[in-house]
């Protein structure tokens, strides 16, 4: 009975270990001249901001990330919108969506990070003054979260205004479920299954098991 339970646990964990590289190694098709940033296809603020963003790398010399925000220094933050993307989407073009068998199976076990969780990770609030360095640091901080693969913060002047700005925060989830299996020999091994973002709540859990046929419990005296 214990051997069957152990084999089932090992098989279950191995499926996730084998599946993860398949997702990570998918080929991303480079954008063509006809591709446009996905926000440009939306109406209102998101559309205006999307049209001002290029999906291509600029030809100009590299610059510090906060430089793009300097012109908005001291402006009032009128609104903040969150755009949360799944791990199967591209943060630069939602037309590039992976939908193979591995992705469909993975989506069954994954839930995108909740909006209230992302709001707790923002360093700025509506109606506060815009601080370029703080926003740039916040963008880097979001990318470093264990359940976020990529993040961008897009800023533009509010409509018909030069003293206030609107902000869009885009985040892309990472597939947060995984596992590890370590087999020392035929009679001994360990398996773990972990979730970095349980139900989109940023809660981490880990379940592990150790099997050792040679290990004997101590007899009470």
Image (spheres, helix red, strand yellow):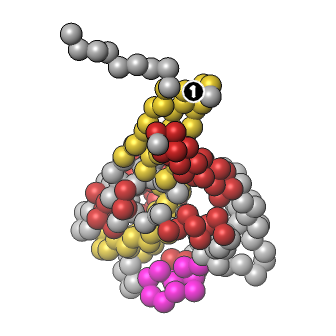
71 and 11: which one is in front?
11
Q: Is residue 206 left or right of residue 8?
A: left
* Residue stretch rendered in magenta on the structure: 37-48
The secondary structure making up most of the magenta span is helix
Q: Is residue 99 visible?
A: yes
189 w.r.t. 162: above or below: above
Q: How many marks?
A: 1
* Residue 47 shown in magenta: yes
Q: Is residue 102 left or right of residue 82?
A: right
Toward the bottom, the furthest residue is 43
141 and 137: which one is in front?
141
Measured from the top left, where is residue 154 in percent x and y?
48, 67
Measured from the top left, where is residue 30 in percent x and y?
77, 66
At x 43%, y 38%, the residue is 208
46 and 95: which one is in front?
95
* Residue 69 shown in magenta: no
At x 28%, y 15%, the residue is 219
Location of residue 51 by image quarter? bottom right
Judge the density around disc 1: few (<14), some (14-19), many (≥20) Cα neighbours within 10 Å: few
Q: Is residue 168 visible?
A: no
Measured from the top left, where is residue 29 in percent x and y?
76, 67
130 and 5: which one is in front?
5
Give the residue number, with chain letter if any, for mark 1: 187
Measured from the top left, where is residue 163 in percent x and y?
33, 72
Which secondary structure, mark 1? loop
30 w.r.t. 43: above or below: above
- Which quadrant holds the C terminus? top left
At x 47%, y 63%, the residue is 109
Toward the left, the furthest residue is 221
């Amino acid at each position: 009975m214990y051997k069957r339970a152990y084999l089932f646990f090992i098989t279950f964990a191995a499926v996730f270990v084998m599946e993860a590289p398949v997702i990570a190694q998918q080929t991303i098709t480079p954008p063509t001249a006809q591709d446009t940033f996905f926000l440009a296809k939306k109406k209102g603020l998101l559309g205006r901001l999307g049209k001002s963003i290029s999906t291509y790398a600029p030809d100009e010399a590299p610059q510090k990330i906060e430089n793009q925000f300097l012109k908005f220094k001291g402006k009032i933050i009128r609104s903040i919108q969150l755009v949360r993307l799944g791990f199967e989407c591209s943060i630069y073009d939602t037309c590039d969506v992976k939908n193979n068998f591995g992705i469909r199976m993975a989506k069954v076990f994954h839930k995108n990070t909740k909006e209230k969780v992302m709001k707790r990770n923002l360093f700025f609030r509506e109606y506060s003054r815009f601080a370029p360095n703080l926003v740039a640091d916040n963008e880097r901080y979001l990318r470093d979260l264990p359940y976020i693969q990529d993040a961008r913060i897009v800023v533009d002047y509010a409509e018909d205004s030069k003293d206030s700005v609107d902000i869009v925060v885009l985040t892309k989830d990472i597939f947060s479920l995984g596992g590890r299996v370590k087999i020392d020999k035929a009679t001994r091994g360990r398996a773990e299954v972990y979730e970095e973002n349980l139900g989109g709540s940023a809660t981490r859990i880990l379940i592990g098991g150790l099997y050792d046929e040679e290990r004997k419990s101590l007899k009470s005296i």
